[in-house]
Amino acid sequence: MSAVKMDGKALSAKVRGSILAETEKLKAQGITPGLAVIIVGNDPASEIYVRNKEKACVECGFYSEKYALPEETTEEQLLGLIAQLNESPQISGILCQMPVPKHISEQAVIDAIDPRKDVDAFHPVNVGKIMVGNFDFVPCTPAGVMELLEEYKIDPKGKECVVIGRSNIVGKPMSMLLLHKHGTVTICHSRTKDLAEVCRRADILVAAVGKAGFVTPDMVKEGAVVIDVGINRNAEGKVCGDVDAAVLDKASFMTPVPGGAGPMTITMLMKNTLKAAKVQRGISE
Ligand code: NAD
């Protein structure tokens, strides 16, 4: 048996289409969602991400502003720009591409963004809201995974869900979202004992490790749903995930890399920006 490939590219196009339709309705009421994207320095991977975010804004009919700041920008200058954007009525969402240069505190940047404009959902206020289960913004990568599960009618309720990775941007929020959907969630990390045994319990296995080929068939239960969040480069320089291709023969559903969880991430950023524009104007639906 070969797993059904969960097509994040197709779902992403569908969701962006519905965001554009909603944006057009909002524009008719004089409201245009606006996203400000800040990039500091010239990390090539970050530049690609930022370009894709700008493209997505165009596709969704949003207004966008891009701030490409030099590497030597001070923390004070960056926080000054964020303060300005917090006040800007044209801007619904603010995103500062991580990582920032080492002389700038990542946490200070996260803390400076108005939680109502924090479309990455990294601010402690939004992190707390996710914990409580009453949130407007969901971190983009885990949100994309949840949409993929829904699209393929995979309900986490009562299922054993194992998340490998405990980062603030993927592993932890992923676990909370699965828990809110009534999954029985186990979070694994670099110090987990008998990782393979824990993973074999999973009906839904999410890999967010950052190591090519990390999840091998012996770690996967027959018929499990396997979500590969990893973005790595293999020895030939090709983009690949955390899950070995041989797992396809064991899983029932699996996300390919590229084309699975990845494309959904930026789409969820757009969804959060649309939501921000609405919430800021007291529109609930
Ligand atoms: P991270 O480095 O912050 O976290 C990696 C996690 O893996 C850690 O919690 C660590 O404990 C765990 N880990 C490392 N070695 C392990 C081991 N031997 N056994 C068990 N656990 C182990 O990474 P991150 O930011 O969470 O990203 C994870 C992966 O997801 C990366 O490949 C990243 O590129 C990718 N990613 C993809 C998207 C997307 O849009 N699809 C978004 C963010 C991150």
Image (cartoon, rainbow, N blue to C red):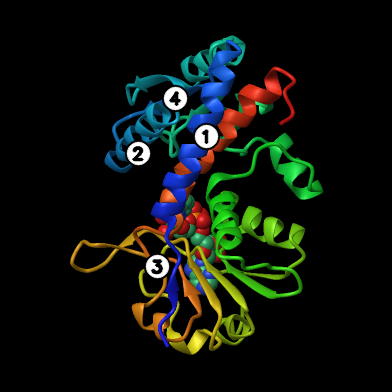
Q: Amino acid at mark 4?
A: Gly
Q: CA distance from mark 1 to mark 2?
A: 24 Å
Q: Position of residue 79 (x, y in %)?
A: 54, 19
Q: Amino acid at mark 2?
A: Ser
Q: Is residue 45 above or below residue 146?
A: above
**Which quarter of the picture shows residue 88?**
top right
Task: Give the Cα separation between the discs numbered 4 and 1.
Answer: 8 Å
Q: Which mark is residue 46?
A: 2
**Front-most of residues 10 and 160:** 10
The answer for how far apart the CA atoms under marks 3 and 4 are is 36 Å
Residue 59 vs 244, above or below: the answer is above
Q: 193 above or below 281?
A: below
Q: Indicate the position of residue 118 as horizontal and vertical percent values.
A: 61, 30
Observer-nearest residue: 189 or 87?
Answer: 87
Camera-side mark, 3 or 1 = 1
Say which residue label 3 marks. 211
Report if residue 173 is visible in the image: yes
- Separation of residues labelled 4 and 2 (CA atoms): 23 Å
Q: Mark number for residue 87?
A: none
Q: Which residue is mark 4?
A: 61
Judge depth for marks 3 and 4 and give the one in front: 4
Local secondary structure at mark 3: loop
Mark 3 surroundings within 10 Å by alpha-carbon count, few (fewer than 14), some (14 through 19), many (20 or more): some
Q: Is residue 282 left or right of residue 60?
A: right
Res 19 label? 1
Q: Earlier in the sequence, mark 3 or mark 2?
A: 2
Q: Say which amino acid is labelled 1.
A: Ile
Q: What residue do we see at 39% from left, 31% from top?
A: 59
Circle nearer the N terminus (3, 4): 4
- Is the shortest distance between ligand 1 and the CB of mark 1 under 8 Å? no
Q: Position of residue 226 (x, y in %)?
A: 51, 73
**Who's the residue at 60% across and 87% down the image?**
197
